[in-house]
Amino acid sequence: MKTCSRGFTLIEIAIVLVIIGLLLGGVLKGQELITSARVRNLVSLQDGVKAAFFGFQDRYRALPGDYASADANINCGATPCANGDSNGRIDAPNAAGTHEELLVWNHLGVAGFLSGSYAFSAGDAAATDANSPKNSYSVYMQLVYDNNYGTGTVPTKHNMKTGGQIPVEIMAEIDRKIDDGNPYSGAFQFSIYAPAGSTAPNAATCINGTAWNIVGGDTNCGAADLF
């Protein structure tokens, strides 16, 4: 007796293809939502730091970290606050050797402009969990007066470093959302800043010409948000 083998009908194949398409669409949409959430998180973090910076400046008529009268006007608890030198710059370090780029987080926190508690000791010279916040990818951020961003000769400005280990597609989307989308122009520019213990972002893999190198897929990029 002959047995008859039966293949898939066109309708069955079409149904399978539709299901596969829906699954792929769901995965891609889910990835897009995750990326959007990470972008919003980092933008919110940057905006919060900038709001704290300008709020402190407005209240004390001085820059956090650089404030020379912090011990008299800010309550740091049992131990008086450390002071900057009030030269109008958040230096790393200042002429007296104080790392104002670390002290800045302490001033912003104890003054109530930034959530979190950041301690500062006179001998602090590098970012630690005790004295500095991290980005969403567990790399220390930095608020400082320098020109460690962009390419070639750039002006020295106050800026907030995002820290590295951020995927290039996240960097590109943030740049498009808050600036001009170009890693070498505007108020949001590529930076090779890397705190101790982390690997510096590489311009050769994060950037392609004058654009973020999305195709390259680098997962260790960073930028500076200029004030």
Image (spheres, grey):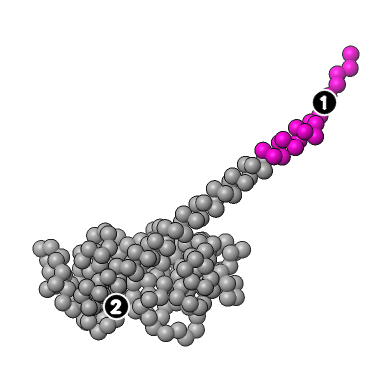
Residue 65 visible to the viewer: no
Residue range of the region highlighted in magenta in the rendering: 1-19
Distance, label 2 to label 1, CA atoms, is 77 Å
Using the rendered view, name the quadrant where residue 99 is placed. bottom left
Estimate the x, y position of residue 122 in percent, counting from the top left.
Answer: 20, 72
Residue 123 rendering spot, x and y as whole percentages: 22, 71
Local crowd size for mark 2, using a 10 Å CA cut-off: few (<14), some (14–19), many (≥20): many
Question: Residue 113 lies in what quarter of the image?
Answer: bottom left
x 52%, y 51%: residue: 33
Between 24 and 98, the one nearer to me in the picture: 24
Task: Read off the residue under disc 1.
Answer: 6
Q: Which residue is mark 2?
A: 90
Dot 2 or dot 1: first in sequence order is 1
Tell me: residue 85, above or below residue 113: below
Which residue lies most toward the top here?
1
Instruction: Classify mark 1: residues with Cα within 10 Å, few (<14), some (14-19) or many (20+).
Output: few
**Can the viewer see residue 32 in this picture?**
yes
User: Disc 2 residue type?
Assistant: Ile
Q: Which mark is residue 105?
A: none
Image quarter in which the C terminus is found? bottom left
Q: Position of residue 202 (x, y in %)?
A: 51, 70
Q: In the orientation shown, which residue stands out farthest toward the right?
A: 1
Q: Is residue 2 above or below residue 52?
A: above
